[in-house]
Image (tube, rainbow, N blue to C red):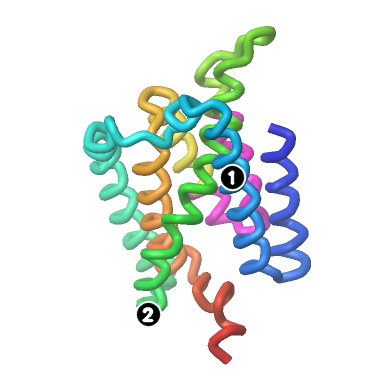
Amino acid sequence: MIAVLLTGLGKFIFMDLLNLRLFYIILAMVIWSTYIVLRSRNIPSVLKYWGFRSNNVQQVFIMILPWIIAAVAMCVVVGFWRDTINPTWHILPLLIIYPIWGVVQQFLIIALLAGNLQDLQRHEISRPVIIFLTALIFGLVHYPYPWLIIGTFLLALFYTHVFLRARNLWVLGVLHGWLGAIFFYTVVDRDPFLEVFGHLLN
C-alpha cells in the first residue's frame, strides 16, 4: 500500500509539476507489470486474487454495463450543459490505449489498496469505509481538476463495490479506460492524447 501511495505521489511530481506524462505512465506500467510477473511466479494464485481472471468476465460486464451506459449519457448531458463537447479523432487511439492504463490504475487503487484493506487481520475495516476511503484517494489523485476528482470519486465508489464482490480487473480496467476517454472529451474539455503524445507529433 505504501508503494501505491508513492506511485500516486509520483503522479503529482512527474505529470503535474514536470509535465512528463508519457514518461510517468510508461515507468509506472513497467514497474508494476514487473512486480505482477515476479509475484505471480512465486504465488500463481495471486493473479486470481488480484482480479486477473476470466471466469466471471461476462457476469461482471453485465453487472456494470447499465451503469456505464448511464454514465456515458450523463457525460454527454454535462458536456452539452458546459459546452465542452470536443469531438476529435484523437479519441479513437485513446479508446485503444487508455484501457491498458485503466487496468493498471484499477490494479493499484482497487486491487492493492481496497483488497489489502479488506484483508487486514489485525484491524478489521467495514466494507463501506473501505469503499469510501478508496474512492476518496482515487479522487484526490486527480487533483487539481475538480470535474476529474468528482468523476473518479463516484466511479471508484461503484467500482470498489463491484471488485469486492466479484474481483475482476479486466472488465473494470477496460471500461474505466473507455469511460475515461469519453469523460475527457465531453466533460473535462481536455485532449489527453495531445497531452501525452503531442510532442511526438510535432
Count of numbered circles on the image = 2
Which corner quadrant holds the N terminus?
Answer: top right
Q: Position of residue 40 (x, y in %)?
A: 53, 33
For label 2, the crowd category at 10 Å Cα-Cα, with few meaning under 14, some 14 to 19 and many 20 or more, is few
Which region of the structure is painted magenta?
132-151
Q: Is residue 181 above or below residue 131?
A: below
Q: Which mark is residue 105?
A: none
Q: Amino acid at mark 1?
A: Gly
Q: Position of residue 66 (x, y in %)?
A: 24, 42
Q: Is residue 172 above or below residue 168?
A: below
Q: Name the residue tied to disc 1.
A: 139
Q: Residue at x 29, y 38 (%)?
A: 64
Q: Position of residue 124 (x, y in %)?
A: 61, 10
Q: Residue at x 35, y 72 (%)?
A: 92
Q: Residue at x 46, y 25 (%)?
A: 45
Q: Name the residue tied to disc 2.
A: 88
Is 145 on the left-hand or right-hand side of 40?
Answer: right
Q: Quadrant of residue 5?
A: top right
Q: Residue furthest front?
A: 41
Q: Position of residue 139 (x, y in %)?
A: 59, 45
Instruction: Name the magenta segment's main secondary structure.
Output: helix
Q: Amino acid at mark 2?
A: Thr
Is 74 on the left-hand or right-hand side of 24?
Answer: left
Looking at the rendered structure, the secondary structure element under dot 2 is loop
Looking at the rendered structure, the secondary structure element under dot 1 is helix
Q: Residue at x 62, y 68 (%)?
A: 22
CA gap, disc 2 and disc 1: 26 Å
For label 1, the crowd category at 10 Å Cα-Cα, with few meaning under 14, some 14 to 19 and many 20 or more, is many
- Residue 202 drawn in magenta: no
